[in-house]
Image (cartoon, helix red, strand yellow):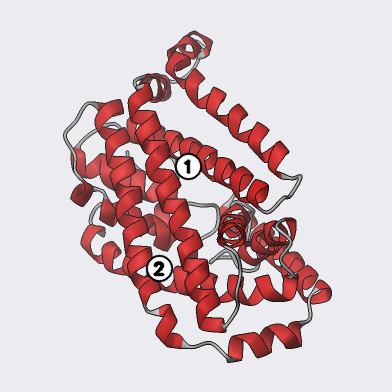
């Protein structure tokens, strides 16, 4: 899909999500809640966001070290990770995942396909941890939705485990595939297959810690708004927002973050009028702070990537 079409689709989904939220929520009550925000309680959220960026960079670095057999530390990937946040917040199609892979591939002089494989693995492991925590949070609130989410988490774990057999798919590469593309696919599959169970488990643990920090962020925002919610509900709301960002959306995940948060919040038994102001403020802080940090990172890596030319062949 072209970038223009992705943008149009994203805007359409955001408009529909926003319209649904407006029609099903008492917006006047939401506005009143937001007007009562006490900024002092929002300041610690900056530390939470910084902690999450560090944890996620540590997770990615561990996967790169294992899959590509190179020495790389957090400091070599954190600016690429922040750049990814910036691109995802300002451009359609989650091009930030490509941007950060391009930066690391060029900086470390390794194959883009290998780095891309670590991004795919990271996303799968992150999703597994996310869905598993959603199941736990919903179970803690007594929601029947915990069962399907738990089953989904197990299914994703099985798929991640099968990744070690990825090289079996090499024989399925058509013989007419251009040599460069075929080599890239083989590099991708071999990088996926190189993952070891202890490393994958460690990455999943880091993902869980990062996602739990989302609950801390929601609780801080709740305190700023004078709202009392259980920890399990805060976790469901934060993770619901993360689910919402997976949908096509206008830049910045406009309205889809809130849609996801309200949906899982309602599964946890929290009224929409309580969830929506929490989601709006949590989303606003996260996007603006991480996008600003990503803009700074862009200045440091601008010689490694061109945002106006992002595509899967950008590493060439």
Residue pictured at 50% horizontal, 18% vertical: 162
The quadrant in which residue 280 appears is: bottom right
Q: What element carries label 1?
A: helix
Outermost residue toward the left?
71
Residue pictured at 19% horizontal, 30% vertical: 70
Q: Confirm whether residue 90 shows in the render.
A: no
Question: Observer-nearest residue: 181 or 19?
Answer: 19
Q: For mark 2, what is the residue?
A: 291
Outermost residue toward the right?
23
Q: For mark 1, what is the residue?
A: 126
Q: Position of residue 133 (x, y in %)?
A: 55, 45
Distance of label 1 from label 2 (alpha carbons): 21 Å
Q: Is residue 99 above or below residue 39?
A: above
Q: In this view, does 3 lie to the left or right of 194?
A: right
The quadrant in which residue 198 appears is: top left
Q: In this view, does 20 lie to the left or right of 118?
A: right
Q: Position of residue 109 (x, y in %)?
A: 20, 36
| Labels 1 and 2: the sequence-earlier one | 1
Q: Is residue 81 left or right of residue 266?
A: left
Q: How crowded is mark 2: few (under 14 residues within 10 Å), some or many (20 or more)?
A: many
């Amino acid at each position: 899909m072209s970038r223009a079409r992705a943008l149009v689709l994203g805007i359409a989904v955001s408009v529909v999500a926003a319209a649904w939220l407006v029609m099903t929520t008492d917006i006047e009550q939401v506005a009143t809640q937001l007007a009562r925000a006490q900024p002092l309680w929002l300041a610690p959220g900056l530390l939470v966001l910084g902690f999450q960026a560090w944890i996620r960079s540590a997770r990615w670095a561990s996967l790169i070290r294992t899959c590509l057999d190179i020495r790389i530390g957090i400091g070599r990937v954190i600016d690429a990770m922040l750049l990814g946040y910036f691109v995802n917040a300002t451009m359609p199609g989650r091009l930030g995942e490509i941007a950060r892979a391009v930066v690391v591939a060029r900086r470390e002089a390794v194959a883009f396909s290998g780095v891309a494989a670590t991004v795919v693995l990271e996303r799968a492991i992150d999703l597994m941890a996310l869905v598993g925590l959603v199941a736990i949070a919903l179970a803690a609130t007594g929601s029947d939705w915990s069962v399907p989410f738990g089953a989904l988490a197990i299914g994703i774990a099985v798929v991640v485990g099968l990744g070690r057999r990825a090289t079996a798919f090499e024989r399925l590469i058509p013989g007419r595939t251009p040599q460069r593309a075929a080599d890239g696919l083989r590099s991708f599959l071999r990088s996926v297959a190189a993952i070891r169970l202890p490393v994958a488990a460690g990455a999943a643990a880091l993902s869980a810690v990062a996602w739990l920090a989302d609950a801390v962020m929601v609780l801080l925002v709740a305190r700023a708004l004078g709202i009392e919610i259980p920890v399990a509900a805060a976790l469901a709301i934060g993770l619901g927002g993360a689910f919402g960002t997976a949908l096509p959306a206008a830049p910045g995940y406009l309205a889809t973050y809130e849609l996801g948060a309200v949906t899982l919040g309602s599964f946890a038994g929290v009224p929409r009028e309580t969830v929506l102001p929490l989601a709006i403020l949590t989303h606003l802080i996260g996007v603006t702070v991480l996008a600003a940090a990503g803009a700074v990172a862009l200045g440091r890596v601008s010689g490694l990537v061109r945002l106006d030319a992002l595509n899967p062949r950008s590493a060439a």
